[in-house]
Amino acid sequence: MAEVQLLSTWASPFVMRAEVALALKGVQYEKVPQDLGNKSELLLKSNPVYKKVPVLLHNGKPVCESSIIAQYVDEAWPAPKDGVDLLPSDPYGKAMARFWADYVDKKVFDGMFGLLRSARKSEEEKKAALENVLSAMQTLESALPEIGGAGPFFGGGSMGLVDVMLVPLLAWLPAIEEVVGLQIPFAERFPRLEAWFAACRGHDVASLLPSSTKMSEFITQFILPRFSS
């Protein structure tokens, strides 16, 4: 068995976070795909509480939940040559990064999934879901220069924990916009976030993410039918 394994499914934004964190720290790992419709004994044993991916196995010891995995990876492995750590070195900087990582989970991704759930609802419900996302994005737009300074990322000149938590939007957001039929006016309303997306697309970790076309097909074939049942 490899020293580091990642129990995963390709479409999960939470798995994407773990993969990006591992890549940023230069950690070699074995990807172990999981069928969530027929959960393996390894998954059930490794994550008996939530029974979901991602799960990081480090020397056989499981670490669960994407934010916790990213922080564990940051602490367990030193930054590669010319690399950086995902969390700042000072306690206050760490606290702020953790706060905004939590915000991304609770507000941004919940808002995005709410927008997706509105795909087969009325136009009024779609617009209400979009307004919820716009509100979350406005908060991030205001926070980005405070956290990241002049750099394009929330980590400044390089990706940090908040960027790791947010970067799966490169794959998911265009697909959600296409499926719902609504578009977030980033260039018009959120120029710093628009620049953040551009910087992420130009980063090496972008190659780890599936295309938005593939995500759109996945959402249409596997997620939307669940909303009708």
Image: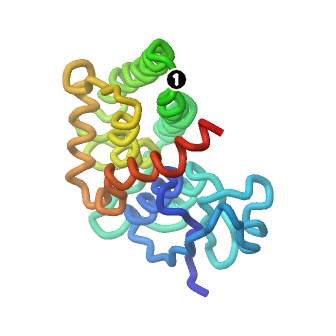
The type of residue carrying mark 1 is Lys
Location of residue 202 with respect to 119 vertically, above or below: below
Residue at 51% across, 78% down: 30
Which of the image's four quarters has the C terminus? top right
Identified at 54% across, 63% down, the residue is: 9
Residue at the extreme bottom:
1
Q: Is residue 89 visible?
A: no
> Relative to residue 173, is residue 15 depicted above or below?
below
Tag 1 residue: 121
- Residue in the foreground of this view, choosing between 137 and 33: 33
Q: Position of residue 107 (x, y in %)?
A: 53, 28
**Residue under the point 78% across and 69% down:** 45
Going by the image, does 105 lie left or right of 148? right
- Color theme of the render: rainbow
* Residue 54 visible in image: yes
* Figure check: 208 above or below 116: below
In this rendering, position of residue 45 left or right of residue 139: right
Q: Residue at x 36, y 55 (%)?
A: 214
Label 1: element kind? loop
> Which one is in front, 24 or 111?
111
For the N terminus, which image quadrant?
A: bottom right
Q: Position of residue 32 (x, y in %)?
A: 56, 74
156 to the left or right of 10? left
Total marks placed: 1
Count neighbours of disc 1 (C-alpha within 10 A) and say few if under 14, some if 14 to 19, many if 20 or more: few
Q: Position of residue 99 (x, y in %)?
A: 54, 33
39 displayed left or right of 211: right
Relative image position of residue 56 (x, y in whole percent): 60, 66
